[in-house]
Amino acid sequence: MSSEAVTRVAILGASGRMGRTLIESVLEMPSLKLVAAVTQAGEAVVGSDAGQLVGKPSLGIAIGTDVAVAAKLADVVIDFTRPEGTEAALAACVAAGTALVIGTTGFSAAQKAAIAKAAQTIPLCQAANFSIGVNVSLKLIADAARTLGAGYDIEIVEAHHRHKVDAPSGTALRMGEAAAEGLGVKLEDHAVYAREGVTGARVSGTIGFATTRGGDVVGDHTVMFLGDGERVEISHKASSRGNFARGALRAAAWLKGHPAGLYDMQDVLGFK
Ligand code: NAD
């Protein structure tokens, strides 16, 4: 494969659950080459070899802490960190003119605006969930909401491992947006994120969320359409992180060579 056909990637959050899975997965994809792996200063893994970190032979790439250097080396930076980590990635990628794949979730409105602003300068692909199965589910959810219409109450239930720090999950929110899109409304005007005590009867047209946290659940999501006398459920269950990593790497390969703009996995899969 010519060096131009190979996409050079840098992985941010390399010490994390997703970062390690990305390092393992990138080694299985000949069209991609790992050129940098970055984590936070002070972590025990800084300076160790990225290959050895995941139990593979040495790659000659030391885990670093400098996002700006990684952005200069790579065609595409892949960020699975925390929102503050993404802020640093945005600044480094804009300065270097490098494409960015964002898998991190839990952004504030201001951070979302910063992502949209950066996408005016660099190609950027953001998805709350890079799994291909989830992205097919999003399409099914929008179609179901459109067809079933307002007579069916929509509730979204999700479960994740005990370490997850944000709720509801970015994927649950994205599923809520897909349902709202299907109904022709905005999620923020209809979402109910918590119920406790005497809440009163369910308000028609709302989209409810419920969150479960515990154990090692990689990610379960079910969208229920509850009608009179029947219900439809669209469920996705992830059993390993490999599907997120492969989707993010596929997005990285797709993003190289695209013009500046804000893309998502629906673009990568050709659904738009
Ligand atoms: P993790 O806690 O295992 O790893 C987080 C990594 O980010 C670590 O390397 C840590 O050092 C680094 N980090 C933490 N704070 C940072 C900061 N302020 N600046 C720079 N780096 C920082 O988490 P994880 O399970 O790997 O998940 C990481 C993110 O990816 C989360 O937001 C999670 O919700 C998201 N996620 C997204 C998808 C998807 O498909 N989009 C799938 C799984 C997880």
Image: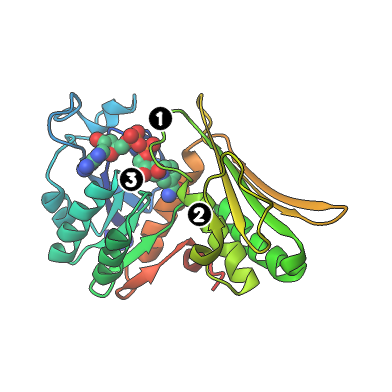
Q: Give the foreground label among 3 and 2.
A: 2
How has the structure been colored for display?
Answer: rainbow
Q: Which residue corresponds to mark 1?
A: 163
Q: Which residue corresponds to mark 3?
A: 80
* Callout 3: CB less than 8 Å from ligand 1: yes
First in sequence, mark 1 or 2: give its number: 1
Residue that appears at 40% across and 30% down: 163
Q: Which residue corresponds to mark 2?
A: 173
Label 3 close to label 2 by CB (< 8 Å): no
Q: Secondary structure at mark 3?
A: loop
Residue that appears at 33% across and 27% down: 56
Q: Is residue 203 left or right of residue 33?
A: right
- Quadrant that contains the N terminus: bottom left
Front residue of this view, candidates 261 and 258: 261
Mark 3 residue type: Phe
Q: Residues within 10 Å of mark 1 (few under 14, many from 20)?
A: few
